[in-house]
Image (cartoon, grey):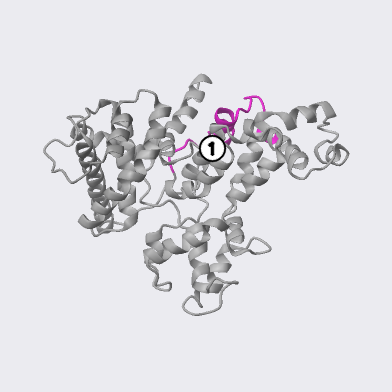
Amino acid sequence: MTYTSSYPYGTRPERWGWERSIAWLRRVEMGTQRGMGAGLDSDGWGGSELERLARTFLEEEDEGRAADVLGRLLPIVLPKARRELSQRFACSAEHREDALTIAVTRLWVVRRQIEWQGANAFGNLLRKIATNALLSILRKEKDKDASEPEIAVSPPTPPWLDVDKLAGEVMLGWPEDVSMAERDLRVFAAQLYWLDRLPWAEIQPLVSGPRRPVSREEFDRWVMDPATLKDLAFRELMVKPEEVVRSILNLDVAPELGPLIAHHTGNAASGPGIREWTAREVVMIVLRLGYGSLAESIVAREDLKCSKDELDALVDRCRNRLPFLRITQDLIEALKPHPDKILADGWLWRRLAFEYWYRHEIPQKDILLRLAEPATRAGYPSFNQGNLTVWLSNNRLLEALRKRLREMGEDL
């Protein structure tokens, strides 16, 4: 099974795939291992809280505690780094965000090799790495504009690899000998029992048949099995773009997004929309929160004539209408009395991050928008930018799959 984009715009060229990220990390290796920001001008990266967190982040040996510290450190340092990049480079905000993501990833990878020299030096190092990353991105864009158009390709995953099955084993706890069809049957049974609240007498004919009879004892094992319940939660929280848009626009049924855009694009300037949303806003919602299109590409559309600030404000208006927190609360209520054992499992949230990042190519900030608050509500407060960076940096989740394959005598 290969990972391909489910969105009509293909793979985003700004996304740093796992091979390109590692290649970039190697290019900057020599520039960062000689020490922190030597010879760079200080620019006021002081403050006792920043200094305490930054030093702990570099010196903490335990990765879990370091990731938590990084989650508290980033809201302090990223706004300043973002502001400095915007002042120095007249490029898209998306490029600057990609550069900062790369910089944070790099800092995580080499943090134990860096000598602490103070908060200003730490800030200067972050700025240096982000600047180098942004210059690299801009050079690539310039080279791309001067050449033939690139054909976007999906991340390199061998076509023979059943990624869903492997990820289910590694992250959700499915036994190797349970087939995908068998998983589907067990999750369906759990859905009927936990979410639809049907009695066994009604469930039995739906899950059992002459070729695959299911006893009550077997059914009881299924619906109490942690792997089954985590997979049920995973599937509920993997919301299709149509369902995201339906939730935001408060529609009775999930719309077909292509015709929805086509219908409202012609009226985008001043035509009627849906309920309190103008036609123009409907198109922006479908593109940004449905398809996951980059803000840059939406702002560039002549028919919408929207600014980045306006688009950000629209996303903020939609935040409380996203379906993920409601789904999580429904799962908490449905799985009583033991939701903590299922929904607070960090590997469930890793599995969701893996799927949204690699398969659907959702940016990290949008993954956080979807899942950070639901994870906290479910009893897993560690779903933050720090941990998300750790999971996706250096392809740690992909490496977990590779480790499992090696145990099976295979490899990527």
Of all residues, the one furthest to the bottom in this rendering is: 270
Of all residues, the one furthest to the front in this rendering is: 48
**Which quarter shows the C terminus?**
top left
SS at mark 1 in the image: helix
**Which quarter shows the N terminus?**
top right
Q: Does the magenta portion include 179?
A: yes
Residue 357 image point, x, y percent = 47, 44
> Which span of residues is magenta-colored?
155-181
Q: Is residue 393 left or right of residue 3?
A: left
Residue 162 image point, x, y percent = 56, 34
**In the displayed structure, would residue 65 be above or below residue 248?**
above
Q: Is residue 215 visible?
A: no
Residue 6 image point, x, y percent = 53, 51
Residue at 32 percent across and 39 percent down: it is: 104
Q: In the image shown, does 9 or 233 lie closer to the viewer?
A: 233
Of all residues, the one furthest to the right in this rendering is: 201
